[in-house]
Image: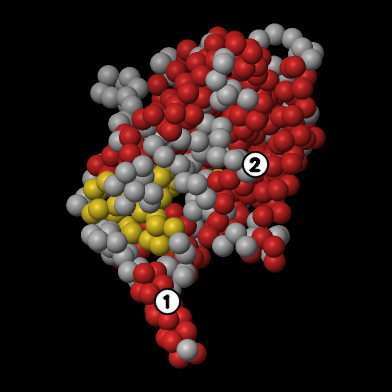
Amino acid sequence: MFITVITVLLLVIAGYVIKSIAKPRNFPPGPKWYPYMGCQSVVEQYSKKHGSQFKGLLELAKEYSTQVLGLKLVNELVVVVYGEKNVKQAFLEQEFDGRPDNFFVRLRCLGKKIGITFADGPLWKEQRQFTVKHLRNVGFSKIGMDKDIQNELSHIIDYINVNNDKPINLKNILPIGVLNVLWKIVAGEQIKEERLKCLMDLFYARSKAFSMTGGWLNQMPWCRFFFPELSGYALIKKLNEQISDIIDETIEKHKMCTIKGKDFIYSYLNEMRQNTSNTFTDEQLKIVCLDLIIAGSQTTSNQLEFAFLAALRNKSLQEKLFEEINNTLQDKPPTWADIQRLPYSSAFLLEVQRFYPIAPLVGPRRLTDDVVIDGFLIPKGTTILISIGDLNSNPKIWDEPHEFKPERFIDERGALKNSECMYPFGLGRRRCPGDVLAKSFIFIVFVGVLQKYRIECSSEVVPSEEPDIGLISAPRPYVADFIPRS
């Protein structure tokens, strides 16, 4: 009897080992899989060696000569797609519209897979459609948003004037400006500055602590009980508590009608009263607000920091920018409508998006059905990551891709031209719903600051152009001198 039990146990173990290292039929090439861990340790090793998960995975794809990289991270099948054809397929085909249902996603959404960022299926379609429509009704794409951004531009200029006796780090003010505009449209008010600064510190730490796959905390959630700080669990919990307090307090104010005017939360509460379905709830509203805060917290301000970094590193281009702005606007504050009147400034910002992609690795997506990519069969339920960072430096698409050249976005008539090969806000049904705010804020603030200041190095050392890449990309910390234009 004992021998039988041992034999059965050994067969079960052997079966588990074989199953855990066996790849699905016609699965994409990638590192060898080991029992339980898959190729997690290989991905971690390459990520550490090359400075980020994005660069580590890119090196693995090159090593295996593939544009579809197959991985297994503990128990999760992950496929990374490269190349314009594959990227467009992942953005546009409906089978890629799902989101993973894992520990990291649920932790990010306060325990439930709801909201709009990580929801999928009918709930996502309904809630996204409502959110996009009503954000537009209360401020997105409206002249009023220009005024709100101009108001934040005034605060940024005041900050520069007050602190102009020393080198300035714009990270202290830009994220606050973005969230002030966003939260006014969402909630009709601004978040108190001290709470905002605390949030920004937590967001920055979160971005550096995690990768797009969620890291060890996602693959082995049990580690949070033994290493809450090291795993990043304590950080996410603290961030969730801070955001929850802000959102709960604001929703309660709206229920008491103590906030004047129209905003997204009032629109949602009104829909809750009128809609007979059970999908419009307090909990869903809270996670939608959380999605909007997280989506707008760093991406826009990081892109703007990169724009000022590019101006700092390219003095001749900065003077060309000022000449265009000064000749066209004089002392008039910039508006979004000026984008066509300032083609070189607009081209400069497009080149910033190409040269410094904020999200070089997009996702994660979950396949809702089996899909064939580049001849490889990807099983339903696989997590998909979409690599767009390497497209921005592909010499087959861009002439001299490692050179910063705004002129590539200006045609022979001197007019602005866009490129179909860049996806800074995604593409398709999951395209970023806040792209209008992001574009407007970046353009108005960048032009408005250069209109009044010349940006110079605060020391003889020029800041590095090499980004820090975590969940998203950010400039390495730098300071600059802002010299008033006479």
In percent of the image, x 47 and y 14: which residue is there?
A: 338
The x and y percentages for residue 168 are 69, 39
Residue identified by numbered label 1: 12
Q: Amino acid at mark 2?
A: Leu
Q: Position of residue 326 (x, y in %)?
A: 52, 18
Q: Quadrant of residue 170?
A: top right
Q: Is residue 374 above or below residue 223?
A: above
Give the structural element (helix, strand or loop) at label 1: helix
Q: Is residue 111 left or right of residue 39?
A: right
| Left or right: residue 183 compared with residue 338 | right
Answer with the quarter of the image where residue 140 lies.
top right
Q: Left or right: where does residue 203 sit relative to residue 308? A: right
Distance, label 1 to label 2, CA atoms, is 37 Å
Residue 400 to residue 53: above or below: above
**Residue under label 2:** 110
Residue 112 x, y percent position in the rendering: 59, 40
> Along the polypeptide, which appears first: circle 1 or circle 2?
1
Determine the residue located farthest toward the bottom in the rendered image: 3
Say whether residue 398 is visible: no
Q: Is residue 231 visible?
A: yes
Q: Identify the residue at image location x=46%, y=81%.
A: 9
* Dot 2: element: loop
Above/below status of 23 relative to 435:
below
> Which residue is depicted at the point 57% across and 16% down?
276
